[in-house]
Image: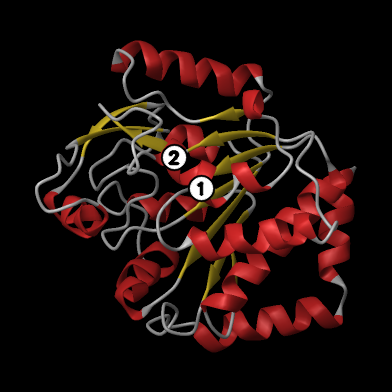
Amino acid sequence: MRVIIAHDPANVAQTCAELISEQLQLKPCSVLGLATGSTPIALYKQLVSRYQAGNMSFLGVKSFNLDEYVGLSGTHPQSYRYFMQQHLFDHVDIRAKQTEVPLGQVEPSKECIRYEKAIVQAGGIDLQILGLGANGHIGFNEPSSSLVSKTRVKTLTPATMAANARFFDKNEYQPELALTMGIGTIMRARQVVLLATGTHKAKAVQAMIEGPVSAQDPASILQFHERATVVLDADSAGLLKQYEYYQWVEEVRKRTNLNEFVLGQSAS
């Protein structure tokens, strides 16, 4: 697992945008796995800015989002389809038919099967973006989720619902169920990039990187991924026992041109 500790949330977004840019330079027709939530918003702003400056194109990209609320249409302001349109899709040159978000108003079990098959038919995900829940969830894979699970319906924990309640009006219906890529689905991505910011994520970050691998901490499975990169700000990295070592690794990486070596190996 590669751990990058950036100065602040803006640098986290910039670093993640650069990793996506490198992927699209190597493979313009990449399949991207995308995430929602407050943390990726700054990343999507970076991507839009790069596109508007003529430095990126998404014309050949196909995307799959991690999850969607059961029962919400794609036009609902709190749906993840709506989120992606507002923050990314409507502002870059990605083709609408190439963007996949689980359908929240389709019979859930059938939609999960369809979605999983669509990922396989697309050739799998080249680079998967992830956020990190305070309880260690990735996607909506809550603690106790199977570490080999496929796309399925998950019941959200009260903690997750409380964390997301701020996005819903006081008397507005908030779904208790979500469709989500499974942990096994996420682990099949060729590259995973997880971003986390803020002191409220520090315990989850430490458990993910330095704790035991456990279904009680779903993100910890990334320790077993062949090419996982975690991008953190100083606050979210604050509890890491090997904080200074992770910084040292990145310094050595830059001095030895290891980035170029890794990219070259990826392209071969």
266 and 79: which one is in front? 79
Q: Which residue is mark 2?
A: 82
- 157 versus 180 height, above or below: below
Residue at 20 percent across and 42 percent down: it is: 156
Coordinates of residue 46 in the picture (x, y in percent): 65, 64
Residue at 53 percent across and 82 percent down: it is: 8
The single residue placed furthest to the left in the displayed view is 171
Residue 268, numbered circle: none
Q: Residues within 10 Å of mark 2 (few under 14, many from 20)?
A: some
- Specify the quadrant that holds the N terminus: bottom right
Q: Amino acid at mark 2?
A: Tyr
Residue at 52 percent across and 76 percent down: it is: 9
Coordinates of residue 14 in the picture (x, y in percent): 66, 70
Question: Is 212 left or right of 225, judged from the image as shown?
Answer: left
Q: How many marks?
A: 2
- 61 versus 53 height, above or below: above
256 and 99: which one is in front? 99
- 249 versus 155 height, above or below: below
- 146 versus 259 height, above or below: above
Examine the rendering and report whether any part of residue 55 can be seen: yes
Residue 86, numbered circle: 1
Examine the rendering and report whether any part of residue 1 can be seen: no
Coordinates of residue 121 in the picture (x, y in percent): 64, 16
Give residue 204's quadrant in the image.
Answer: bottom left
